[in-house]
Amino acid sequence: MDSIIQIQNLTKSYGNNLVLKGIDLDVQSGQIIGYIGPNGAGKSTTIKILTGLLTEYGGSAKIAGLEVSQHPLEIKQMLGYVPENAVMYDTLSPAEYFRFLGSLYGLDRRDTEQKGGELLRIFGLYDNRNSRMTSFSKGMKQKVLLISGMIHNPQIIFLDEPLSGLDANSVILLKEILQRLSQTGKTLFYSSHIMEVVEKICDRIVLLKEGVVIAHGTFQELQKQQHSGTLEQLFNQLTGNNEHLALADEFVQILSE
Ligand SMILES: Nc1ncnc2c1ncn2[C@@H]1O[C@H](COP(=O)(O)OP(=O)(O)OP(=O)(O)O)[C@@H](O)[C@H]1O
């Protein structure tokens, strides 16, 4: 299998704060990589570097053999990105938004409109295609965001907490969609805190803590190494926060003081 994403000794600082401390990672084409870690570990920062949004970094980050900071346009054509916190033009309707994105990607206007409508139908939003997104719920906006990140049919898709706001049925649907995309050869870089989904759909899992990769392998490999049951338990063991019972007691105690 070909390596489609290659990261070598990747570092990133915000001012004096070194948040990525030398990450090495090789992602094979057609895989779903689960990129997990505690809040503030550096997951979104890594994704922003790989998608070309943060251009200043140390070490190397390559997509399809191209250094991201040196080939921003070629790389953006190959990628889809579903960001964690998107600023959407929500005074537009989904149909208008897709047309706008289509024009950025140089897609045919009528094809984009039709495709966008059909993809909205899959998520139960066809009747909302011409409504302003200011009136949409969080989950409805998230569905539009998911479609927006994939409408140009990219080979590599970055998903940063893509389940945010989705109801249980939509989560099941998205899980199936992502697995099928991977079966057609697309590479998915999937970052989430929902361990149950990561465990089920990801071919490999990378656990980041304070800007360092502390575990990497298939779920079965990690399970064997750590003698743990679920990915949630493994996460808890490796990120060192098994004090949650005492912390919960303390939280409630402080509230009542
Ligand atoms: N624009 C920024 N300016 C300064 N510091 C930043 C900026 N963005 C992120 N950071 C810091 O970098 C570190 C990593 O943040 P990042 O958003 O990559 O973490 P994350 O793993 O995605 O966390 P979460 O799970 O909470 O989304 C944090 O300490 C954060 O405060």
Image (cartoon, helix red, strand yellow):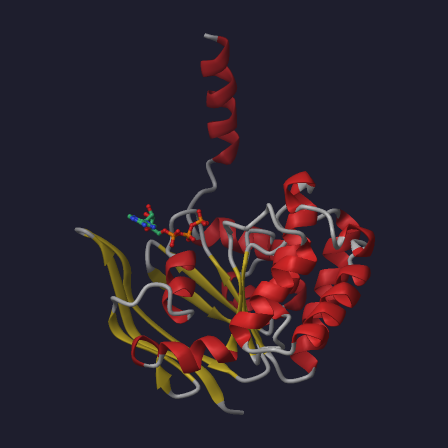
Q: Does any portion of residue 101 appear in the rendered image?
A: yes
Q: Position of residue 202 (x, y in %)?
A: 61, 69
Whether residue 230 sits left or right of residue 222 in the image: it is: right
Residue extending furthest front? 109
Q: Residue at x 65, y 43 (%)?
A: 138
Foreground residue, 205 or 148? 148
Foreground residue, 98 or 180? 98
In which quadrant of the rendered image does the N terminus lie?
bottom right
Q: Position of residue 134 (x, y in %)?
A: 63, 41
Task: Report how many numbered discs are placed on residues in the image.
Answer: 0
Name above or below for residue 122 compared with residue 74: above
Whether residue 198 sits left or right of residue 172 in the image: it is: left
Q: Position of residue 28 (x, y in %)?
A: 51, 83
Q: Quadrant of residue 52?
A: bottom left
Residue extending furthest bottom? 1
Q: Position of residue 150 (x, y in %)?
A: 62, 70
Whether residue 189 sits left or right of residue 38 in the image: it is: right
Q: Does any portion of residue 221 appear in the rendered image?
A: no
Q: Quadrant of residue 51?
A: bottom left
Q: Residue at x 66, y 63 (%)?
A: 147
In which quadrant of the rendered image does the C terminus lie?
top left
Name above or below for residue 31 compared with residue 251: below
Residue extending furthest left? 16
Q: Residue at x 56, y 71 (%)?
A: 103
Q: Residue at x 74, y 47 (%)?
A: 167
